[in-house]
Image (cartoon, rainbow, N blue to C red):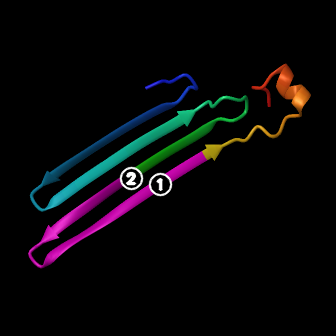
Amino acid sequence: FRSQLGQREARAAASQAWDGFALDAALGDQRTDNYRANSDFKQVNFGAGAQWRFSEGRAGVRVESLRQDGRLPGALSQAQYDANPRQT
């Protein structure tokens, strides 16, 4: 979806199982432009797993990754704010 401040979010996931074996994966992306210049935020995450089933139990492996990038625009004087409250 997209809002007034440029917020966007997307998610996807998939899984599949076979006889004694299963895979799954998920991906997410979140971004926003925020109100002021130079105040954007980005986040991407990924997860995947595999699992094996045996007569004695089960074993699996999982990988997770998350990356974030956020920026802060800094303070403004009253005169700067009055001229343009969205400036950096």
Magenta stretch in the rendered image: 48-68
Quarter of the picture holding the N terminus:
top left
Mark 1 or mark 2: which comes first in sequence?
Answer: 2
Q: Which residue is mark 1?
A: 65
Disc 2 packing (10 Å; few <14; some 14–19; many ≥20): some
**Residue depicted at 26% across the width and 43% down the height:** 14
Q: Position of residue 53 (x, y in %)?
A: 15, 68
Q: Main secondary structure of the magenta part?
A: strand
Q: Residue 62 magenta-drawn?
A: yes
Q: Say what secondary structure mark 2 lies in.
A: strand
- For the residues labelled 1 and 2, say whether their Cβ atoms are less than 8 Å apart: yes
Q: Say what secondary structure mark 1 lies in.
A: strand
Q: Residue 40's image quarter?
A: top right
From what the image shows, is residue 59 above or below residue 68? below
Q: Which residue is mark 2?
A: 47
Disc 1 packing (10 Å; few <14; some 14–19; many ≥20): few
